[in-house]
Amino acid sequence: MSHILPMINTDALDETPLASGFRRRPAEERGTADHGWLRSAFSFSFANYYDPKNMGFANLRVINDDQIMPGRGFGEHPHENAEIFSYIVGGSLAHRDTMRNSSTVTAGGVQYMSAGSGVRHSEFNPSNDTPVHFLQVWLLPNQDGGEPRYETLDLSPDEISGTLKLFLSPDGRDGSLAMRADGLIFAGRFDGDQSAEAVLPEGHQGWVQVAKGSVDVNGQRLDVGDGLAISKGGRLVFSQGVEAELLYFDLFG
């Protein structure tokens, strides 16, 4: 399937305001689906879940928190003009596509696909006994068309412990994968007294998605599954983590 959702006014996110420029998207208010073999929570409108107040944020269009049961998966289906990545939280995720790519990534791994002018792919859990847990994310591309491409990247626990590790960027800087979207995407783990800082430039928008545990961002407590929309630039401090694992998006598209 190829869902590209329309641009919206991000001020319409209908959640209780926190500090100025911050708005929490609580985990328990996400859309959900349980197909038995697949359990999903949707931060933004997707498939049969429709919420006109949560259609996306900046050029970020999909954050699906998915769990696929052993031996099951998504059959071959098409995409075009979308930047798509899966961040593996636990278990293993296998990928095949019409570009003849075939790979399996495990926890800490990233599968990135630029759909470009069009591609078909499948994703499935190759394990016989362990579910796979991953965040599937879609962004609008900064250009339509182009040859589709696919890459993977493994992030070790040490690389993301107590820091924000860049893994996707428009230009492939600092060992990241190069994507066709306007944003910088980081992964981090925080526990105990670990902390990290980031500066969101003026005119950019930010999003934090908590995959595991809990963490403070500028004093705002976020628990597993929570999202945080950041609508103005400034200094961000990630701290007070309790076995936290998260994605941070610096968006300028």
Image (cartoon, grey):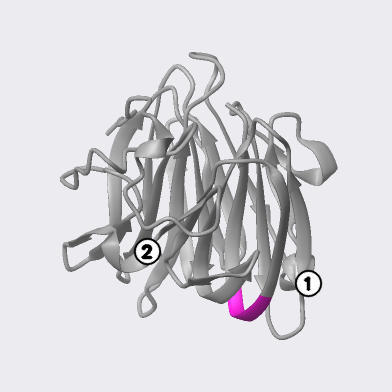
In-image side of 87 versus 6 (left or right): right
The prevailing secondary structure element of the residues shown in magenta is: strand
Q: Nearer the viewer, residue 121 or 50?
A: 50
- Give the foreground label among 2 and 1: 2
Q: Which quadrant is home to the C terminus?
A: top right
Residue 228 on image: x %, y %: 50, 56
Q: Considering only order in the chain, which callout, 1 or 2, is on the residue closer to the N terminus?
A: 2
Q: Which residues are magenta?
A: 240-244
Residue 105 on image: x %, y %: 56, 59
Callout 2: few (<14), some (14-19), or many (20+) C-alpha neighbours within 10 Å?
Answer: some
Which image quadrant is residue 157 in? Answer: bottom right
- Image location (x, y in percent) of residue 20: 55, 51
* Disc 2 and disc 1 in contact, CB within 8 angstroms: no
Residue that protrudes farthest toward the right in the picture: 174
Q: Which residue is mark 2?
A: 26
Q: To which residue does mark 1 refer?
A: 158
- Marks 2 and 1 sit apart, C-alpha to C-alpha, by 29 Å
What is the secondary structure assignment of the residue under circle 2? loop
Q: Is residue 234 visible?
A: yes
Query: Considering the numbered disc 1 on the image, is that residue within a helix, a strand or a loop?
Result: helix
